[in-house]
Image (cartoon, helix red, strand yellow):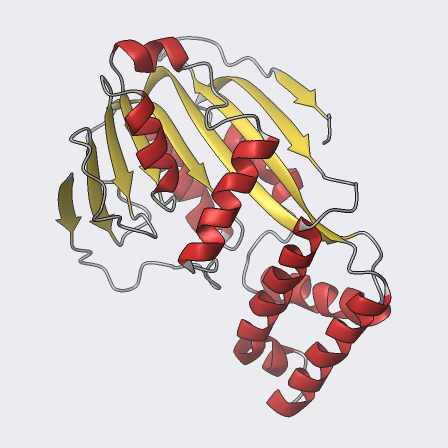
Amino acid sequence: MNHLTQINEHDSTPKNVFNIIDDEDVQIYMHNFYKFFFNGDLGAPVHEKLQKSAKVLAFRECGIWTAEVAAEYPNSEFYAVDSIILDSRNEFNNITFIECDDFKKIPFPDNEFDYVFTRDNFLYLEKTTLQEGLSELFRVLRPGGWLEVINSRQTDLAPGLMYTGLVNAWRSYLETQNIDSDILNNFENYLHETGKIDYMSYRIIKPQAKNASEEVFIDFFLMFFRNARDVLASFMNISFEEYDVLMNNIEKELEAKGNRMTLLHKKVLARKKYTHSKETEITIPDLSTK
């Protein structure tokens, strides 16, 4: 395993307003969840390329995906930028972990990678930072190469009044920070705005059946919004104590309604166009659910 570090020289770089939960157990659970519902680690048609030899960028993913795919494709080179879990136990020689704290500048030259993979990194970014980040990913992607992005959003299948009020307050707060509160549905628009793609498709997964995962999603939801107290309490013009009472009441409300919460997942594939090719808007939705 190799390890590189880049130091950011600009402290004013916009950051995520609210970070995704970094707990390792949560990340492992979510990795296995994605793998199950999307039928494997790969969505882009890159299997044959990876078998022969390819250069792969895993951008801000937890490190588990990188380790698994690198083990399956030993002839390819993998570069994991800003992995949440820098797994020192990994002994694969085809993985290089890189720390880079500037979202807008990935430390590689243009047209370097055949395949770029990232997930859950665009949910809470300012719109300008989101657009700059996508442009940067396409900059390092080779013409004809694939970008694969997974975004998720929690959805209550039986929402109550307090839950709905909290979620609406959160969305309003995001809009005040110039953050798209519905990035899941609007993400393809940002991809098209880069002017770099000639093909795009997406797949949506929304588990409907009652299953054990719902209790886990409830825990994620409660953990996330309890951690958001510092920003949301002030935005809602209530005290921390009142916010804590609200969260306790929402937990009771969710239990009373049967804890019917799930995650809506969207996987988007985009191919970078060749320099002089005409951009073709091709979207093939797959609305199948499991």
- Please state if 253 lies on the left or on the right of 71 as rendered: right
Rendered-image quadrant of the N terminus? top left
- Please state if 280 lies on the left or on the right of 257 as rendered: left
Residue 193 lies, in percent from the top left, at 51, 32
Question: In which quadrant of the rendered view does residue 91 lie?
Answer: top left
Q: Nearer the viewer, residue 192 or 92?
A: 92
Q: Nearer the viewer, residue 8 or 89?
A: 89
Residue 164 lies, in percent from the top left, at 79, 64
Q: Please determine whether, in this image, residue 272 is positioned above or below residue 136.
A: above
Residue 186 visible in the current orientation: yes
Question: In which quadrant of the rendered view does residue 152 lie?
Answer: top right
Count of marks, rendered view:
0
Residue 160 lies, in percent from the top left, at 85, 65
Residue 121 visible in the current orientation: no
Question: In which quadrant of the rendered view does residue 167 lie?
Answer: bottom right
Residue at image position (59%, 21%) is 201
Residue at image position (66%, 50%) is 213
Residue at image position (63%, 39%) is 265
- Please state if 143 lies on the left or on the right of 161 as rendered: left
Q: Residue furthest front?
A: 212
Residue at image position (30%, 63%) is 12
Rendered-image quadrant of the C terminus? top right
- Please state if 275 lies on the left or on the right of 225 as rendered: left
Residue 250 lies, in percent from the top left, at 75, 73
